[in-house]
Amino acid sequence: MSIEMIEAVGHRFLPTYFKQCASLLKSNGMMLLQAITIREQRYAQAKRNVDFIQRYIFPGGALPSVAKMLDIVGSDTDMNLLHMEDFGLHYARTLRLWHDNFKHAHGTLTELGYDDYFLRLWEFYLCYCEGGFLERTIGTAQLLLAKPDALREPLLGRFNA
């Protein structure tokens, strides 16, 4: 399982990352990857530029596109996509709630020594991300990737709830 750490891998090392993941799985293994992604139409431009988040929040961070990840998985590993979900709109709501909580905590944060610059930076970050998810410029995808022998029957109905 990989939850939103692929953004720290960087564009250059995506093939290495997926090859390593595939090599660590048994022939019937599966992996679940959750990633914040960028729309394919913006991927090439995003690779060339440094945005607000890369400059102030996550230096060196890089959002992959779903298409780029699947291209690498298909060309560099023996894994296949079994299922994918994108729940970016839910993430937008989560960011709105985080922002509300952050605003309510301003007094406490100020008492802890965080200055106005820090507070404004993080308010902007939370709103910036919320807008990206609402406009579907960025998304949150879960990809269930599987090795060749992973499933010999349908995925649904395999588990007792």
Image (tube, rainbow, N blue to C red):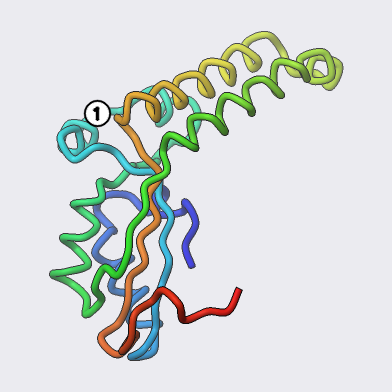
For residue 30, above or below residue 46:
below
Residue 52 shown left or right of residue 106 in the figure: left
The amino acid beneath tag 1 is Asn
Q: In which quarter of the view is residue 160 placed? A: bottom right
Q: In the depicted view, which residue is nearer to us: 120 or 13? A: 120
The quarter holding residue 25 reads: bottom left
**In the rendered view of the protein, which quadrant contains the C terminus?**
bottom right
Q: Residue at x 37, y 26 (%)?
A: 132
Q: Nearer the viewer, residue 150 or 35?
A: 150
Q: Residue at x 65, y 15 (%)?
A: 119
The vertical placement of 25 against 105, above or below, is: below
Q: Please state if 103 lies on the left or on the right of 148 as rendered.
A: right
In-front residue for pair 5/37 = 37
| In this picture, residue 70 sits left or right of residue 28 | left
At horizontal 84% and vertical 19% (from top left) the residue drawn is 108
The x, y position of residue 51, in whole percent, is 34, 25
Percent coordinates x, y for residue 129 in the rendering? 45, 26
For the residue carrying disc 1, how many other residues have a C-alpha within 10 Å: few (<14), some (14-19), or many (20+)? Answer: few
82 or 99, nearer to the observer: 82
Instruction: State the residue lying farthest toward the top.
Output: 116
Q: At x 86% / y 16%, what residue is drawn?
A: 111
Q: Determine which residue is flagged by label 1.
A: 49
Residue 116 lies left or right of residue 105; in this view the side is left
Could you say where residue 139 lies in the image, as x and y percent from the top left?
36, 39
In this view, 53 is above or below 21: above
Quadrant in the rendering for residue 80: bottom left
Image: 5 above or below 117: below
What is the secondary structure assignment of the residue under circle 1?
A: loop
- The picture places residue 42, in percent across and down from the top left corner, at 19, 32
